[in-house]
Amino acid sequence: YFEMLNNLKDFIEQNNYEVTLEGHTDSIGSNQYNIGLSRRRAEAVKAKLIEFGLAEERIVGIEAKGEEYPVATNETPEGRLQNRRVEFRLVQR
């Protein structure tokens, strides 16, 4: 996923965007654990974007959503995999 993050970094810079990162998890584990995991997941993406050269001030927020907003069923391994994600909310400066 590094290439995708580097492309996102370029897109943010070229189009004068700011980004909020939203971490998500599947439903395995307690709610408290999943909130922490989703925060760590979003923080890891933030660190990688900064490593690729995105100015830290372009990242205006980190939100830990935990298991609250699944995009797929948590009943299958494939669905749980889809729910383990970081979403990007872009806002033009």
Image (cartoon, rainbow, N blue to C red):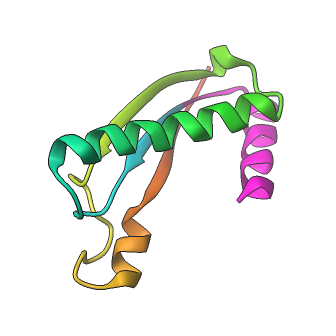
Q: Position of residue 84 (x, y in %)?
A: 42, 61
Residue furthest out toward the top? 57
In this view, the residue in front, 80 or 13, is 80
Q: Position of residue 53 (x, y in %)?
A: 83, 28
Give the answer, above or below, for where 80 lies relative to 83. Answer: below
Residue at x-position 21% and y-position 57%: 29
Q: Position of residue 86 (x, y in %)?
A: 48, 50
Count up the numbered dots.
0
Residue at x-position 73% and y-position 28%: 50
Q: Quadrant of the C terminus?
A: top right
Q: Which residues are magenta?
A: 1-19
Give the answer, above or below, for where 10 lies relative to 69. Answer: above
Q: Is residue 14 magenta?
A: yes
Q: Position of residue 28 (x, y in %)?
A: 24, 64
Q: Quadrant of the N terminus?
A: bottom right
- Give the left or right position of residue 92, taking residue 52 as reference: left
Residue at x-position 49% and y-position 39%: 42
Give the answer, above or below, for where 67 lies relative to 62. Answer: below
